[in-house]
Image (spheres, grey):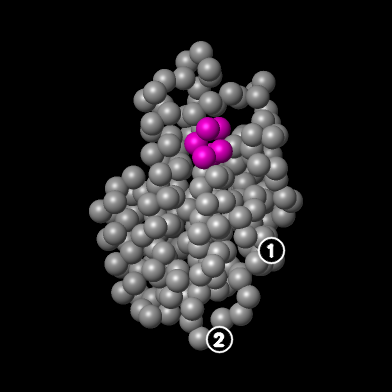
Amino acid sequence: AVNEVALGFPNVVVLPLDVTDPNSIREAVGQVRARVGSSGLNLLINTGGAPRRSTLATETPENMALLYTTNTIGPLQTSQAFLPLLKEAAMAEGQGEMSCSRAAIVNISSILGSIQAAEAWEERQDVCYRCSKAALNMLTKCLALEYGGSGILCVAVDPGCVTPPLARGTGPVTMEESVQGVLRLLAQLSATSNGTFWDWRGQSLPW
């Protein structure tokens, strides 16, 4: 589907990227730099992730390691690798306040990673997923504290329980609703949003 979009829009470039492979990340950074030049990268969305159903009774170290590698360590490595390009965009001449148009990292998280809300426990425990997303939320706060001084906005966003393409009735939010909501949210974020947690409707979420 992404390749079909790229065929219709010459400014869309599709690059391979495995967030669990440092070599793949470095290769992607090099290809992005070749395209953006000295203007840098304005927006990095860490949306790669892996779900894994589990309960406290069935959880395993292997499950936990797999989810942390993809959902938490992946965004960390990707953010570290793209930092020089994000800094270049943040420092570009004529840039204003913090925003997703200047320089930003958006980590796609989940309400299931909220320790305070602990939502839907009776419906799905998903222990390894919840823990990996809670860790991602803390990573987002750490990125905001460290990179905010360079003008880079860092936030976590829950896109909602999205109905997969070609599926019916499997989620309360359609892909179109989620994407449109997230885009509206990103357009509104500013310096006061740095290090915060939001849902696709633009509502602040508890950690």
Instruction: Tell me the residue at 45%/71% (across/down).
Output: 87
Q: Quadrant of residue 84?
A: bottom left
Give the percent coordinates (x, y) of residue 91.
49, 78
Magenta-colored span: 130-135
Give the percent coordinates (x, y) of residue 191.
65, 67
Q: Quadrant of the C terminus?
A: top right
Q: Name the residue nearer the viewer: 145 or 172.
A: 145
* Label pair 1/2, CB-CB below 8 angstroms: no
Q: Quadrant of residue 81?
A: bottom left
Relative vertical location of residue 164 with respect to residue 85 in this rendering, above or below: above
Please tell me whether the stretch drawn in magenta is mainly helix, strand or loop: helix
- Marks 1 and 2: which is nearer the front? 1
Q: Residues within 10 Å of mark 1 (few under 14, many from 20)?
A: few
Q: Quadrant of the N terminus?
A: bottom left
Residue at image mark 1? 192
Q: Name the residue nearer the viewer: 92 or 201.
A: 92
In this picture, residue 198 sits left or right of residue 126? right
Instruction: Tell me the residue at 50%/74% (across/down).
Output: 90
Q: Amino acid at mark 1?
A: Thr
Give the percent coordinates (x, y) of residue 71.
45, 41
Residue at image mark 2? 94
Q: CA distance from mark 1 to mark 2?
A: 20 Å
Sequence-wise first label, 1 or 2: 2
